[in-house]
Image: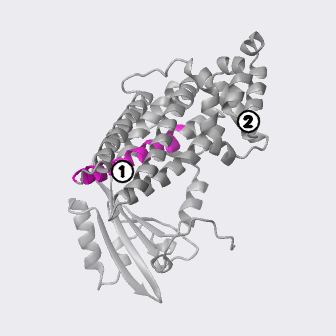
Amino acid sequence: MSEFINNATKRKDALKAIIRKLHAGESVENLQEEFNEIIAVSTASDIAQAEREVIAEGLPVSDIQKLCDLHVAVFQQGLESQAAPETIPGHPVFNFRLENEVISRVLESIEVSLAKVLAGDANALKSLRLAVGNLQLIERHYEWKENLLFPVLEKYGFEGPSKVMWGVHNDIRKAIRRVQSLANSDPVDLGTVDAEYLALAKAVRDMFYKEEKVLLPEALNRLTQEDWDLIKSESLSLKEGPAYVEPTQAEQAPVFETEGKVNLLTGALTPEQINLMLTNLPVDITYVDENDQVCFYSQTPERIFVRTAAIIGRSVQNCHPPQSVHVVQNILDDFRAGKRDAAEFWIQMGGKFVHIRYFALRDAQGAYKGVIEVSQDVTEIRALEGERRLLDDKA
């Protein structure tokens, strides 16, 4: 056993053998008996490294996703021996674990209501439907992992387990939608609701275990305090879902590498990158500053309204015909006075349905800084029907 304790390479190779045997159909019980010694000293880092390497060697991520619950079962002995992740009030990990507790209470409330409905209490159906609606908390919880924790972990080479978890997230999301749809149908097929919910609850609770015993210990082991500070600052905007960062957050925004780049609130780009981005958006953009002067327009390949460099520095009122300049002035006056933050119009022009929107721009103190005009040909968008979830192979 000492050869495994003191030799990380041997531990990794043994763990890879376990994973491959598991995927070849070996039972959990046989593997636990055969590899008891190595399992007992395996850490979350060892397991993550082994999974990452078998993926790199050709084992599909989708296969690992299908059997990742069995992975946890095989390695549970080793994982259980590790100390729980440190929990510090205010730390993202503390909040993350607290969310798991809240989700656990949601699951318990569903189980109580479901038991009452199955026992014949028709009045409990309303409570069941309300409780099932709270499953959306899981979606937010997974978004935090996918958009904040996974990208930072990837910087340290921790990719395989993240990809597997993301796949499981999507399976759970589908299961949530099925349970919610079944619970809100009329009449309700209680037997199907019960079966679907039990499978969902098991998947969610199994994910709790994977987070506590693999993901969070790995994150605490790898991430720096600077990483956690970034995640903490971004967590508020992700959970509240605003289209902008509040002033107090903006003041604490991280500073990105800026050599040859323009430092922005959520990244840094070269002037070339900014130009490429703006000229390839499927919308026309014009920016007018707080003095009503045109400062910028995007020269997209198929621009809807013609713009030329001659308008730069021109008064925006002079860019419109006399018949419509009063509309423009009213919008500017309302924006400047704080009476509104947006205005929109739509017109039909040359067989196109064009959507035109104006947005007031304000700084962190709320001072008016101009307006951005966004125009888009939405003809094809309005004609869309149904869904497309796969990539169209047509060039």
The spot of residue 101 in percent (x, y) is 37, 32
Quarter location, residue 92: top left
The local crowd at label 1, few if under 14, some if 14 to 19, many if 20 or more residues have their Cα within 10 Å, is few
The spot of residue 4 in percent (x, y) is 75, 16
Q: Could you tell me the amino acid type at mark 1?
A: Pro
Looking at the rendered structure, the secondary structure element under dot 1 is: loop
Tell me the quarter of the image containing the C terminus: bottom right
Residue under label 1 = 242
| Residue appearing at x 56%, y 66% in the figure | 279
Observer-nearest residue: 385 or 350?
385
The local crowd at label 2, few if under 14, some if 14 to 19, many if 20 or more residues have their Cα within 10 Å, is few
| Residue 15 can be seen, yes or no | yes
Q: Which residues are magenta?
A: 123-149
- Outermost residue toward the front in this view: 119
| Residue 265 can be seen, yes or no | no
Look at the image and say whether residue 128 sits in the magenta stretch.
yes
* Nearer the camera: disc 1 or disc 2: 2
The spot of residue 244 in percent (x, y) is 38, 50
Observer-nearest residue: 179 or 136?
179
Q: Is residue 68 left or right of residue 190?
A: right
Look at the image and say whether residue 186 sits in the magenta stretch.
no
Looking at marks 1 and 2 on the same chain, the residue that comes earlier in the sequence is marked by 2
Residue under label 2 = 26
Q: Is residue 378 left or right of residue 325?
A: right
Tell me the quarter of the image containing the N terminus: top right
Q: Could you tell me the amino acid type at mark 2?
A: Glu
